[in-house]
Amino acid sequence: MSKRGTSSTDVWDAFFGDFYVRAYASDERDHAAEAQGLAAARLSGCPEGGELLDAPCGFGRHSVPLARAGYRVTGVDRSGALLDEARRRAGGERWPKFVQADYRELPFGEESFDAAVNLFTSLGYLGDEEDVRVLAGIRRVLRPGARLVLETMTRDRLVVHFSENDWRLMGEGRLLLEQRTFDPVQGVATTTQTLVDGASRESRTWTVRMYTATDLVRMVERAGFSDYKVYGGFEGEPFDVESRLVLVAIK
């Protein structure tokens, strides 16, 4: 674990590779990804056929259905393995475009996009300062008045629903076991995941920063966004400790 309390880049590169694809490619939650992605795009105000950034995009769980809905989606991810799976899912269509890059260093010019989405708890891996850098980079590539829609688990919700151990079937006979510890003062959660696939077992351990809504609001302000709105869902539901957080940051 690094001094900033989160796992190192090497740990994340190992996690978001073949292990992640095998663990999550048949995740039942992907059935909801299309509806969530489309709701996020509507909330972002991205115009029909507009330029939409999905960062990070993982294996395309949101990018692909958003592109099929008519948005010109660019998905960015550091992991070549995840992008290979994303391209397979896209089936050779013109959109989405996939770009391999660290989302701290987006390889696009200023004001390139009409909107951006950051979904499925995609902050917290790098620590506070580096996550502010991510947000500032997304802001840089947005056009004036454009919005970033960020959706994540919060520290408060984790406290309410914390479980030390659980497991779930991930499709095709794969079982994913999770063991967790949580430091509520530092807001740091450590998880060991073990993927059981037939006679094969493989484990990864990683540590992530869990933010409160207050933390995230301060971070988007530090990143230079001019305004924000906070919801408990993509349809504008009120935010509370039981809900996931949907934050709309306005450039």
Image (tube, helix red, strand yellow):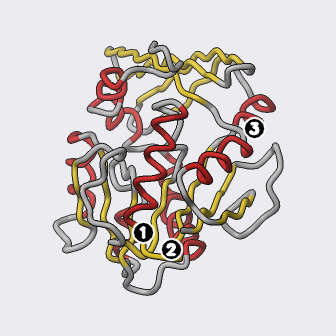
What's under tag 1, amino acid-wise?
Leu
Q: CA distance from mark 3 to mark 1?
A: 30 Å
Q: Of callouts 3 and 1, which one flags the residue occurring earlier in the amino acid sequence?
A: 1
Mark 2 — residue? Answer: 146
Q: Residue 25, position in %: x, y?
A: 37, 43
Q: Element at badge 2?
A: strand
Residue at mark 3 to residue at mark 2: CA–CA distance = 28 Å
Q: Amino acid at mark 3?
A: Arg
Q: Report x, y in % for residue 48.
A: 43, 87
* Residue drawn where x is 41% and y is 29% of the image: 174
Label placed on residue 157: 3
Whether the residues at callouts 2 and 1 have beta carbons within 8 Å, the answer is: yes
Q: Residue at x 60, y 46 (%)?
A: 219
**Helix, strand or loop for disc 1:** strand
Contact check, label 3 and label 2, Cβ < 8 Å:
no
Q: Is residue 178 above or below residue 97?
A: above
Give residue 190's position: percent from left, percent from top. 56, 18
Q: Is residue 193 left or right of residue 157?
A: left
* Up-down relation of residue 138 to residue 165 (above or below): below
Q: CA distance from mark 2 to mark 1?
A: 6 Å
- Seen at 74% across and 44% down, the residue is 214
According to the picture, the residue beneath numbered tag 1 turns out to be: 142
